[in-house]
Amino acid sequence: MSTALRLEKITPDNVDAAIALRVHPHQEKNVAPVANSLAEAYAFGEPAWPRLIFDGDELVGFLMAFLDIQWAPKKDPEDYRSGLWRLNISADHQGKGYGRFAVEAVREEIRRRGGSLMYVSWEGDEDGPGDFYRKLGFRETGETTGGQAVGVLDV
């Protein structure tokens, strides 16, 4: 990992590269492909925050945050949350600190917008990213969403 890490918006110039990004095959059941995430970003509009992760000129990953989404309107209409929605680090770039960079980038964006908590959810199987998120300080809330564990981190 170099010091030339940056996030970029998805544009007509980089969308094909974004869609081509692939995680390890054994992880595909745990995270949606980038194309699905971009469709959801389009459908959700402003609360979705999709970004590509570059190291210099090389595309190494994709993230999508959710910013101020009403979490459970039936339970608590005042419960708005922000967090990491998707994280796809390309198979050949994993284990190099790019995931940590992505989490910190979302954390900083939430902080910049005045938020105090960052949420994430993950699949609970052995190939899931639970250990990764716990090592970064996320605490399980005891909640689930779509069958996934929910974690929270102070920003």
Image (tube, rainbow, N blue to C red):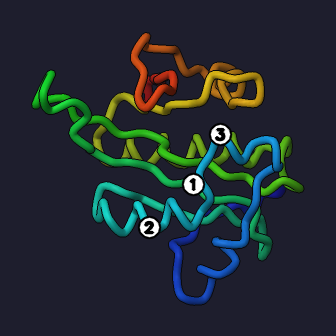
Give how far across and how far down residue 3 sits, in percent: 77, 58
Which callout, 3 or 1, points at the residue further toward the start of the chain?
3
- Vertical position of residue 110 compared to residue 118: above or below: below
* Residue depth check, mark 1 versus mark 2: number of the one nearer the observer: 2
| Distance from the alpha carbon under mark 3 to that under mark 1 | 14 Å
- Vertical position of residue 148 compared to residue 87: above or below: above
- Labels 1 & 2 near each other (Cβ < 8 A): no
Residue placed at 32% from the left, 65% from the top? 43
Q: Quadrant of residue 62?
A: bottom right
| Distance from the alpha carbon under mark 1 to that under mark 2 | 14 Å
- Vertical position of residue 17 compared to residue 114: above or below: below
Describe residue 124's horizontal placement relative to residue 70 as left or right.
Answer: right
Residue placed at 71% from the left, 66% from the top? 54
Going by the numbered disc 3, the residue's amino acid type is: Asn
Q: As rendered, which of 49 and 97 lies closer to the eye?
A: 49
Q: Element type at marker 2?
A: helix
Callout 3 environment at 10 Å: few (<14), some (14 to 19), or many (20+)? some
Q: Quadrant of the C terminus?
A: top left
* Residue 30: assigned label: 3
Describe residue 116's horizontal placement relative to residue 63 as left or right.
Answer: left
Furthest toward the right, the residue is 92
Q: Element type at marker 3?
A: loop
Which callout, 3 or 2, points at the residue further toward the start of the chain?
3
Look at mark 1 in the image and give the residue it sits on: 63
Going by the numbered disc 2, the residue's amino acid type is: Ala
Callout 1 environment at 10 Å: few (<14), some (14 to 19), or many (20+)? many
Q: Quadrant of residue 27?
A: top right
Q: Element type at marker 1?
A: strand
- Labels 3 & 2 near each other (Cβ < 8 A): no
Residue placed at 70% from the left, 28% from the top? 132
Look at mark 2 in the image and give the residue it sits on: 39
